[in-house]
Amino acid sequence: MKHIEVYTDGACSGNPGMGGWGAIMHYGDVEKVISGGEMQTTNNRMELIAVIVALEKIKEPCQVDLYSDSAYVVNAFLQDWIGGWVKNGWRTSGKKEVLNIDLWKRLLVQTERHNVTWHKVKGHADNELNNRCDALARGEIEKLKNGR
């Protein structure tokens, strides 16, 4: 099984507000950089979209080391929140409907396809690839603000 490293980040100007996301994917010496944005969204949705789109871009099932500064995304898997949500019909332990169900379901499809190992990185610190993803996400917000 091929091994790919993926770094992702999402950002929002206002929450909700204009949002952007970025991902950097490494397979051997090959680097693929992707990004996008939405006019009206939330930071958590952008964090999820970055991960989902990166995983969807991978053409065949792979071993993926995924690095994100989003505790929301990473802990859903590392602490198995997602397993509880699915078991409880997409309800939290407090019986409220899970937010962003549409995106969590898309992400589950990808985590069933790929063997994903989740890594939480510190945001806005010394991780070069995480910082590049943050810059991509913020760049997408600027494009939206400037009408591009």
Image: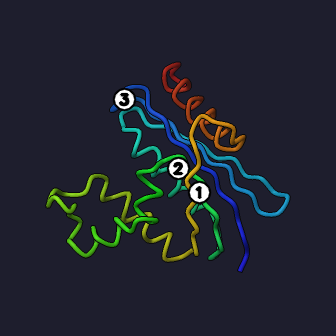
> In the rendered image of this protein, does residue 15 appear above or below residue 95?
above
Residue at label 3? 17
Cβ atoms at labels 2 and 1 below 8 Å apart: yes
Q: Find the distance from the CA under tag 1 to the CA under tag 3.
A: 22 Å
Locate residue 140 relative to residue 95 in the image: left or right.
right
Rendering coords of residue 145 (x, y %) = 49, 21
What colour-coding does the image apply? Answer: rainbow
Between discs 2 and 3, the one toward the N terminus: 3
| Residue extending furthest toward the top | 146
- Point out residue 55 in the picture as x, y percentages from the top left corner: 57, 62
Residue 104 in the image: above or below residue 44: below
Q: Are marks 1 and 3 in contact (CB under 8 Å)?
A: no
Left/right placement of residue 111 relative to residue 62 reads left
Circle 3 residues within 10 Å: few <14, some 14–19, many ≥20? some
Q: Name the amino acid, label 2.
A: Ala
Q: Secondary structure at mark 3?
A: strand
The C terminus - image quarter:
top right
Between residue 106 and residue 1, name the one nearer to us.
Answer: 1
Which residue is identified by label 1? 54
Residue 4 to residue 25: above or below: below
Question: Real-space Cα distance between discs 2 and 1?
Answer: 6 Å
Identity of the residue drawn at 68% across and 49% down: 24
**Residue that appears at 40% across and 65% down:** 79
In the depicted view, which residue is nearer to us: 128 or 99?
A: 128
Please name the residue that numbered disc 2 is placed on: 50
Dot 1 or dot 3: first in sequence order is: 3
Specify the quadrant of the image occupied by residue 126.
Answer: top right
Picture layout, residue 84 above or below residue 135 = below
Three-letter amino acid code at the position of disc 1: Ala
Label 2 environment density (alpha carbons within 10 Å; few <14, some 14–19, many ≥20): many
x, y (%) of residue 29?
A: 85, 58
Q: Residue at x 55, y 23 (%)?
A: 142
